[in-house]
Image: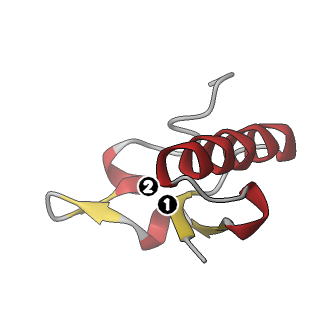
Amino acid sequence: MPIINIKMAKGRDIEQKRELVKVFTQDAARIMDVKPEWITVIIDEYERENWASEGKLHVDKFGPGFGKKNQ
């Protein structure tokens, strides 16, 4: 059973998550030639204060709300 783990910053709404897991599931099932019900998707969300790149916390690097559609 394929397991897809998505790691992302917090801030996406439930509709975005629904669409994301639907697309990942459909495409993974097609590509791997398995039944969609065999695909598991796990979303791990992180506060921006717990995510860093280039030695900087994302809350400092990008500011609060970065990456959200309406910001």
**Residue 10, located in which quarter of the rendered image?**
bottom right
Residue at left 71%, top 58%?
35
Q: Provide the residue designation for mark 1.
A: 48
Q: Quadrant of the C terminus?
A: top right
Secondary element at image label 1: helix
Residue 43, relative to residue 32: is it above or below? Answer: below
Amino acid type, callout 2: Val
Q: Which mark is residue 59?
A: 2
In percent of the image, x 37 and y 55: which residue is there? 58
Residue furthest left as drawn: 54
Residue lying at the far top in this picture: please name it: 70
Q: Position of residue 39 (x, y in %)?
A: 67, 65
What is the C-alpha distance between the residues marked 2 and 1?
5 Å
Residue 22 x %, y %: 74, 44
Considering depth in this image, is 4 or 62 the residue closer to the camera? 4
User: Which labelled disc corresponds to residue 3?
Assistant: none
Q: What is the x, y in percent for residue 24? A: 61, 46
CB within 8 Å, label 2 to label 1 = yes
Quarter of the image that includes the N terminus:
bottom right
Residue 50 located left or right of residue 23: left
Q: Residue at x 49, y 54 (%)?
A: 32
Answer above or below: position of 58 versus 55: above
First in sequence, mark 2 or 1: give its number. Answer: 1
Instruction: Sort mark 2 into few (<14), some (14-19) or many (20+) by Cα contacts within 10 Å.
Output: some
